[in-house]
Amino acid sequence: MNKNIRSLAAAALLAPAALMAQERYACRTGNVSFFSATPVENIEAHNHKATSVYDATAGNVEFAVLIKAFEFEKALMQEHFNENYMESNTYPKAIFKGKVTGITAADLKKPGTYPVMVEGELTMHGVAKPRKEKATLTVEPTGAVKASCDFIVKPEDHKITIPAVVRGQIAEEIQVKVRIDYQKM
C-alpha cells in the first residue's frame, strides 16, 4: 500500500509539469474568406468567427468554420450560398483536422516568420478530403502566434452541386484564405 501512495504522489507532482510542457494556442475569431472570380461576377465572402486550437508540442491543429457565418456583399448571394450550394442547415460546419510540420514548440519561443506544411483532412458539405498546404506561422515579439494559409477548393471535390444555369457565375476553383491570431492557452 505504501508503494501505491508513493506512486500516486509522484504522479500528482509530475502531472503539472507534463501539462506545462504542452504548448497550446487557441483562437475564436479567426478569419476565413473565399473569392470566386468569373467574367460574369466576382463572389467574395468573409467569416470572422473561425475557431482553432493548435498544440505546438504534438503539431496537431484543428479549426472549425460555421458556414452560416460567412458574410456576403449581397444578401441574395448569402441566401443562395447557404440554401442552394452549401446546404448549411444539413452541413453547418467546415472542419479541418491535421498536423503542422516544419516547426517545433521551441521555435515558437523566438519571434520570426516560419514556413510550415499543414497536412490533414478538410470536411466540408459532408465530404472529407485530404489536404496538404503550405502555410506560414509568425511569432510576434509578444509571443502571439499568427497563422496564414491560402489554398484552392473545387466545389465538386466536396460534392457541392452548381446548377448549369449559373455555372458560369461561379469559378471552378475557389480561392480560400485563412488568417488565425492565436493566443497561448
Image (cartoon, rainbow, N blue to C red):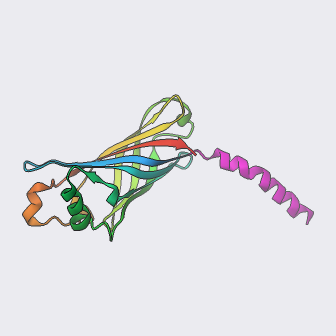
Q: Is residue 129 left or right of residue 1?
A: left
Q: Is residue 22 magenta?
A: yes
Return the x and y of residue 105 as percentages of the image width and height: 55, 40
Give the residue displayed 32% in from the left and 69% down from the top. Answer: 89
Image height of 35 relative to 106, above or below:
below
Residue 25 can be seen in this image: yes
Image side of residue 115 versus residue 41, left or right: right
Depicted 62 relative to depicted 90: above or below: above
Residue stretch in magenta: 1-24
The picture places residue 167, in percent across and down from the top left corner, at: 11, 60
- Asked whether, in this view, residue 87 is left or right of residue 170, the answer is right
Q: Quadrant of residue 153?
A: bottom left
Q: Quadrant of residue 83?
A: bottom left
Corner quadrant of residue 78:
bottom left
List the single residue furthest toward the front. 75
Q: Position of residue 60 (x, y in %)?
A: 50, 52
Nearer to me, 123 or 98:
123
Q: Which residue sits at x=19%, y=67%?
A: 161
Q: Quadrant of the N terminus?
A: bottom right
- Which residue is found at the position 55% from the left and 50% from the top? 58
Residue 156 shows in the view: no
